């Protein structure tokens, strides 16, 4: 799906094995202002792209994502941002989503950058891989994580579960569980700040 400026609602859709050269292997949404893009009960698996291999939210997009699964999405080449989901200059609210076995350079499951804002509630991040932030990577953005579980995520450099990079980031974690996450070579098996 390629969306610029629209306000789509997708219910119970399946995106498998899709490829984009740059961003949004499964879906790319840009300029989708409030009420924005809505995803309910969708599945994104085995999609590839450089950024947001499953879903890429870009350029002032507002999104609500609930009950979606992101599995086995990965970068095509290069460093990459957000194997399952990427946010750049966008806002998103995610509830009850699962991210499993996704891979990227920064944010194996989710990459949040460029002044974005994201809230995660009752989400699970398991067995995702990245150089930085095996589960979630945050840079110059605001992120809230409530009742979220991080298990067996791996970063080859820093932040097996969660990596907060650079100035201007605000991250809050409430009732979070970090278990068996690993930073293979440097710092912060669970969290690196």
Image (cartoon, helix red, strand yellow):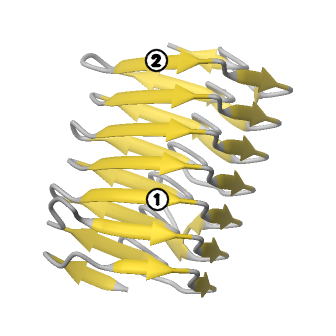
Along the line of sight, the residue nearer the viewer: 3 or 23: 3
Nearer-N-terminus badge (1/2) = 1
**Res 56 → quadrant:** bottom left
Within 10 Å of disc 1 (Cα), the crowding (few <14, some 14-19, many 20+) is: many
- Secondary element type, mark 1: strand
Left or right, 75 with respect to 32, comes to: right
Write down the residue under mark 2.
Answer: 172
Labels 1 and 2 touching (C-beta < 8 A): no
Q: Is residue 77 left or right of residue 93?
A: right
Query: What residue appears at the point 55 percent right and 86 percent down from the top-left corner?
Result: 18
Q: Is residue 155 above or below residue 51?
A: above
What residue do we see at 56% from left, 27% from top? 146
Task: Name the spot of residue 52 as percent of width and height, x first.
Answer: 44, 62
Q: Residue at x 64, y 39 (%)?
A: 122
Where is the N terminus found, in terms of image quarters? Answer: bottom left
Residue 24 position in % (x across, y down): 41, 72
Label 1 or label 2, whichever lies nearer to me, is: 1
Q: Position of residue 169 (x, y in %)?
A: 32, 21
Separation of residues labelled 1 and 2 (CA atoms) = 19 Å
From this view, report whether residue 51 is shown above or below residue 99: below
Q: Residues within 10 Å of mark 2 (few under 14, many from 20)?
A: few
Residue 153: which disc? none
- Residue 184 appears in view: yes
* Residue occupying image coordinates x 40% and y 47%: 93
Camera-side residue of 155 and 68: 68
The reply, left or right, for residue 74 in relation to residue 64 is right
Is residue 21 visible to the viewer in this orientation of the structure? no
As helix, strand or loop, the secondary structure at mark 2 comes to strand
Q: Left or right of 7: which side holds 110?
A: right
> Label 1: which residue?
65
């Amino acid at each position: 799906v390629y969306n610029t400026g629209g306000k789509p609602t997708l219910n119970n859709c399946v995106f498998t094995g899709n490829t984009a050269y740059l961003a949004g292997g499964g879906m790319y949404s840009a300029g989708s202002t409030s009420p924005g893009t809505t995803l309910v009960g969708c599945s994104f698996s085995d999609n590839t792209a450089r950024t947001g291999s499953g879903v890429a939210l870009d350029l002032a997009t507002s999104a609500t994502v609930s009950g979606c699964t992101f599995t086995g999405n990965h970068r095509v080449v290069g460093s990459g941002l957000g194997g399952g989901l990427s946010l750049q200059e966008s806002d998103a609210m995610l509830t009850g989503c699962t991210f499993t076995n996704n891979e990227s350079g920064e944010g194996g499951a989710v990459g949040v950058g460029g002044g974005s804002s994201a809230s995660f509630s009752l989400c699970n991040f398991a067995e995702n891989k990245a150089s930085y932030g095996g589960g979630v990577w945050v840079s110059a953005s605001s992120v809230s994580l409530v009742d979220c579980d991080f298990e067996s995520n791996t970063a080859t450099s820093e932040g097996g579960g969660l990596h907060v990079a650079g100035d201007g980031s605000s991250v809050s974690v409430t009732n979070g569980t970090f278990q068996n996450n690993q930073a293979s070579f440097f710092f912060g098996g669970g969290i690196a700040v």
